[in-house]
Image: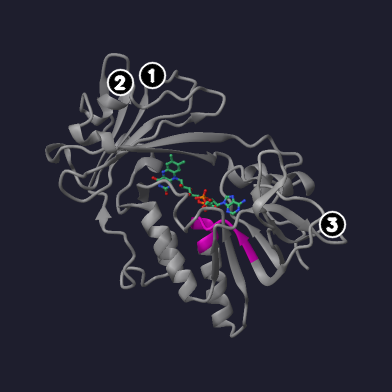
Amino acid sequence: MARIAGIERETLDVDVAIVGAGPAGLAAALRLAQCAHEGKRALRIAVFEKGASVGAQILSGAVFDARALDELLPDWRGRGAPVCQDVVSEEFLVLTRGGIWSVPAGLRPRALDHGGDHIISLGALWRWLGEQAEAAGVELYPGFAADTLLFGDQGQVIGIGIGDKGIGRDGQARANFAPGVDILARYTLLAEGARGHLGRTAIERFALGRGRAAQTYALGLKELWRVTPERHRPGHVIHSVGWPLSAGTYGGDFCITVLSAGLLSGWSLAWATPTRHSIRLPSCSGSRRTRRCETPSPAASAWAMARGCWSKAGCNRCRGSIFPAER
Ligand SMILES: Cc1cc2nc3c(=O)[nH]c(=O)nc-3n(C[C@H](O)[C@H](O)[C@H](O)COP(=O)(O)OP(=O)(O)OC[C@H]3O[C@@H](n4cnc5c(N)ncnc54)[C@H](O)[C@@H]3O)c2cc1C
């Protein structure tokens, strides 16, 4: 996605422009809409998502702590949120070249204690959250990728520029060229996930990382497996660390039963390491041993894989997350 310079563009005026319809963007939009409703104020809130639909870019399958959803929509159960599988059992394993050690519950790291959590399809939950946001008056624009930040006379952010469509590899407009719109906003909120290019522009331009160590990131992979019914344990979560990663390498893997019944049970699996380390694909024996199955089931040809990235140090690596963005 890019923009061709020197083109006259249509503009759209909104009160709040939010980039990214992930969990953060949708939750922020919905909370703002709730505040506007409580304060009896009309607020035009628009969320721009580069994926073709809300939830399309989100990796499926996750262990979910519902605390934030409890605060945002206390009646989420009554509204039919697709959160139907509780975590019922957990294992934390340490892998060595020759064995597997199961860590007793009392010695498990707190971050890996999922009592009271749920297993969800992230895509399904965020599609549902998108519907709740729309019902509260938020405008959702899937298929609209923000390409640039727009700056005002004082250097402040005054909105975002949506990327042009129909630009050839040579950078020239093709027959189907459609210029991107300029979104002019009183407030701009960046919720594009880890390493979003607009966020990095803002961090650099407003020196938000000055005096802080560089951000660190982790990469993750998820695989969706079909397993036979006898291997299917709804609500069971396994985390493991150790072999084949070296002692100094951050990472591990996890298995979550993500579907509720029958042959189409699924596993989600990730191998997360810092970017400077190579990713060892989960077909290697460590993960297989974690899953305790030597080969995928005959139905495994339909497995799906996705990758993602997240920042490990988060806001600690920024002086703040607020920059001049008032129009
Ligand atoms: C492998 C892996 C496993 C994980 N497992 C779990 C788990 O089990 N439980 C859990 O709670 N969390 C888990 N997470 C973390 C969780 O996915 C993230 O914390 C969460 O998705 C962050 O939400 P977000 O809205 O900040 O960003 P994202 O989910 O990344 O959403 C950002 C959105 O912005 C859109 N976007 C980006 N750039 C633009 C642009 N320029 N214009 C328009 N739209 C844009 C993207 O398409 C995307 O929809 C996992 C992450 C990974 C990578």
- Three-letter amino acid code of the residue under disc 2: Ser
Q: Which residue is mark 3?
A: 155
Q: Residue at x 45, y 35 (%)?
A: 220
Q: Is residue 39 visible?
A: yes
| SS assignment at label 3 | loop
Residue drawn at the location 51% of the way across and 53% of the way down: 51
Q: What residue is at 54 percent from the left and 82 percent from the top?
A: 38
Relative to 208, is 253 on the left or the right? Answer: left
Mark with earlier residue (3, 1):
3
Residue 297's label in the rendered image is: none
In the rendered structure, which segment of residues is drawn in magenta?
17-26
Inspect the image, locate mark 1, and give the three-letter code of the amino acid beneath it. Pro
Q: Marks 2 and 1: CB-CB under 8 Å?
A: yes
| Residue 13 horizontal side relative to residue 294, left or right | right
How many angstroms separate mark 2 from mark 1 (CA)?
9 Å
Q: Label 1, on which residue?
A: 244
Given this view, does label 3 or label 1 mark the residue nearer the observer? 3
Q: Is mark 2 within 8 Å of ligand 1?
A: no
In the image, is residue 278 part of the stretch drawn in magenta?
A: no
- Amino acid type of the residue that numbered disc 3 sits on in the rendered structure: Gly
**Residue tagged 2:** 285
Q: Residues within 10 Å of mark 1 (few under 14, many from 20)?
A: some
User: Which is more N-terminal, label 1 or label 2?
Assistant: 1
Image quarter hosting the C terminus: bottom right
Q: Is residue 272 above or below residue 171?
A: above
- Image location of residue 314, percent across then percent down: 59, 44
Q: Does 18 lie within the magenta span?
A: yes
Between disc 2 and disc 1, the foreground one is: 2
Asked if the residue under mark 1 is in contact with the one under mark 3, i.e. CB atoms within 8 Å, the reply is no
